[in-house]
Amino acid sequence: MRPLSSPIYLLSSIFSPLSPTITAVTTQPSPDARLTSLDQFRGYTVLGMFLVNFAGSFAAVPAVLKHHNIYCSYADTIMPQFFLAVGFAFRLTMMRRIAAGDASLAYLRAAKRNLALILLGFVLYHLDGVTKTWADWQALGVSGFFKNAFQRELFQALVHIGVTSLWVLPVITRGPGLRLAFAAGSALLFHLLSQSFYYEWVMGRPGIDGGPLGFLTWTVPLIAGSFACDWLSAPGPSQPIPRLLRWGATLMVLGYALACLNLQSPPAKVKLGPQPTPGSAVTGLLVEPPFIPPTRPVNIWTMSQRAGSVSYLTFGAGFSLAVLAAFVWACDVRGHRLPLLTTFGTNALAGYILHGLISDALKPYTPRDAPGWFVTAAILAFISLCWLFLRGMEKQRIYLRM
């Protein structure tokens, strides 16, 4: 794989289509060989990531587009959708490769790919802390390095995808019962560890997207994606949309029901969100639904992307299935397709890497307290630049794959 190693290479990929120095990273399969709905769903998810990651720091942006860590906002629905798409593609690829030849080779290639993704995450995110002098390193020691360097920064999107995929690898090609049990068992293990110590640690540290043990609950949307793959790939006149909606609704209701257990548990020891007042008592059976800020103290049952809570990932998996159902209807049934989403969806890894660089280029001159019209213009400029680079790569059939 040839990396996009410099801005010069990126610019040449856009403005010099005949340059002999540019070669394609990989060849994109023909549209007929792909599921249009999955590409469009992934493209929508990439577009949503661009929006919430760039816009979230500005005061003029509505709260629902920001991450709050004490309830599920629209911004928090984006990452589970990536995992759903990963689980879909993971199972589809594994089943095809096993059917075509050596199963052991298919598993080896999957392991290598996800280890490479973790390595890429290390390069992008870095480790916690720094040693400026040799004396600092000696004081830290090897044990201190392993204790402190891997707590927070490393565990972001790409590393979570890589670690979760490795965790799920033994069951990704198995039957539905085993996969469902594996997802439920992983979620239960995460909750037990959170009850024991992990919730207070990851919220107080604070961690990112569930922290080092987050892979246990990110398993839920990834496994949900593997089921979506089964439903959309089934031979004959299958009806994937009702299944996607039925399971999506079931998981969303289950996630919300788990969140309502907040009322039966004491508030978190870490001060987050609304705090209890002396003499106050928790009443009622239901907490605020997703997308609505809480009015009660939060705890281990609260939907939280930072905590990677079971309620959040269960609801997120269901919401993702429902969104995918909408794209299956619009694309595979009605035949609609947006070129913008195709551009974003077929080169998601490149988009992920590039959007951080483009954001860093624009934000120094986009004040956090800028008025709404200025923020809107900045968002449009940001998304346009992301599209410009990705469209240029698409024209030359340059796609980043691990």
Image (tube, rainbow, N blue to C red):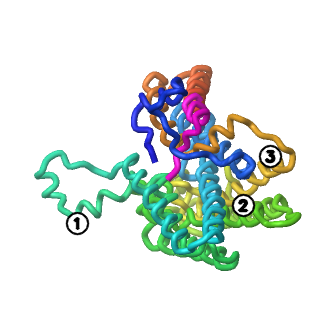
Location of residue 209 with respect to 170 vertically, above or below: above
Task: Identify the residue at image location x=60%, y=22%.
Answer: 377
Q: Nearer the viewer, mark 1 or mark 2?
A: 1
Which one is in front, 173 or 251? 173
Q: Quadrant of residue 102?
A: bottom right
**Residue 333 in sight:** yes
Per the image, the residue denoted by label 2 is: 252
Sooner in the amino-acid sequence: mark 3 or mark 2: 2
How many marks are shown on the rendered structure? Answer: 3
Q: Quadrant of residue 301?
A: bottom right
Asked if the residue at tag 2 contacts the one at tag 1, i.e. Cβ–Cβ closer than 8 Å, the answer is: no
**Which numbered disc covers residue 143?**
1
Q: Secondary structure at mark 2?
A: helix
Per the image, the residue denoted by label 3 is: 331
Q: CA distance from mark 1 to mark 3?
A: 53 Å
Location of residue 35 with respect to 268 vertically, above or below: above
Q: Secondary structure at mark 3?
A: helix
